[in-house]
Amino acid sequence: MESLSFYVLLLIAIIAGWLLGRLGPSKSTRTKASSSDLFQDYFVGLNYLLNDEPDEAIDTFIKALEINSETIETHLALGALLRRRGKVDKAINVHQALLARPNLERDFSNSVRLQLALNYIAAGLLDRAERLLQEVLDDGAEAKWDALRQLITIYQTEKEWENAIACSSQLLKNARFRKDPALLGGAAHYCCELAEQYLHNNQVSQARAEIKRAFTFERKSIRAMLLLADIEQRGGNYKVAIKELLRVRSVKREFISQLLEPLASCHESLGSRSDFEKLLRTMVLEDSSTEAALMLAKMISARSGNAEAIGLLREHLEHSPSQGALIELLGLQLHGVDEHVASSLESLLNLVKAQAQGSSEHSCHHCGFETKSFFWMCPSCKQWDKIRPINELPNRQASVASK
Ligand SMILES: [Zn+2]
């Protein structure tokens, strides 16, 4: 059993016991038999809990505790616990029963709506969740801030970016959330999603407007900078595109791998190959970029043969070991060696290639999800900007970690 759920259950069991102690035997309307039933149920529940059968325990506590003004909070918590344990249908029943009670206090009915909406989201019933959250929002009470957060989750899932931006803007009016980096970053991404849709339909001015809006949420939005560079490149404004791409490098160096292709293409169009080669050298020296080293090695070997490229890769591998650079180096060394050495180098190369093929290139810094491709939003935990490249070989990571 997860320890948190266990402690929550234990706490609920204590509260339930206390409530039964207060309400059970002293009520004059309650018969002796029904209060003894109540206590029996309670101890059965406790027994389930001690026997590591939490789901049965929750069911029994819910059955034992009659819903009234003193037990209503406990029912709310038990429903939430059911959802967290994956029993979404049961959680919906518990919270629906609470909401159906007449004369619920305003704050409490909003709390039940929020919990019920979470159940609906967990069950994939997003329309129902949205309707409930809209009711909380219309009520205008303090619970509206939680409702807005949940609505953002729904609109993000449904890719209703304009609605997600509207909810984020409302939340940002609250001083508590005004500087929330996740909220600001998310809103910038919604604008970028819209910008990408416009770009897909060749509506460049609308795309530019969305990029401008993204910058109002996050001044250093990498995605917005990349999109802007893309627009400039498409429009033939190569120097402006290069400037924008280099701005990305100055903000987040880990994005260098995404800058190389557009930078190469812009420099190619401008006929400034040597400037690009100089830039790549800077990226290798200052940023220890393996992708820059690989591109530079290819350019050098095409221009002046393999020896210089091999030297560059060897030097780079000494301080920044990576599978990519190793594969490239072995590939270059295959040429010009005798047949016997070539054959053993080739088997070594195939081994490293096989290992590289199976390994992930990116990982999520929030949930640890690993993936070959890059995503702005982690497909697993749905957080923005948490996917980062994994550059180092395992021994490098271990030596860095042990320092
Ligand atoms: Zn994640």
Image (cartoon, helix red, strand yellow):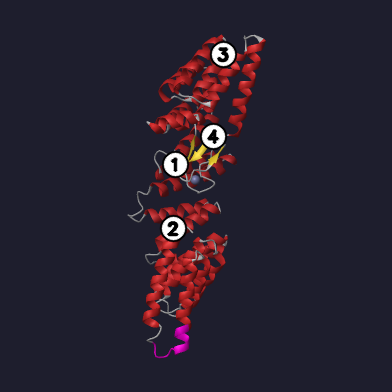
For the residue labelled by badge 3, is the local secondary structure a helix, a strand or a loop? helix
Residue 106 in the image: x percent, y percent? 40, 73
Asked whether the beta carbons under mark 2 and mark 4 sit within 8 Å of each other, the answer is: no
Badge 1 local density, few (<14 within 10 Å), some, or many (20+)?
many
246 or 371: nearer the viewer: 371
Mark closer to the observer (3, 4): 4
Point 46% across, 24% down: residue: 320
Q: Which mark is residue 301?
A: 3
132 or 65: nearer the viewer: 65
Badge 2 local density, few (<14 within 10 Å), some, or many (20+)?
few
Label 1 to label 4: alpha-carbon separation: 31 Å
Q: Quadrant of the C terminus?
A: top left
**Residue bearing the label numbered 4:** 361
Asked whether the beta carbons under mark 1 and mark 4 sit within 8 Å of each other, the answer is: no
Ligand 1: does it lie within 8 Å of the C-beta at label 2?
A: no
Residue 274 in the image: x percent, y percent? 49, 15
Does 120 appear above or below 235? below
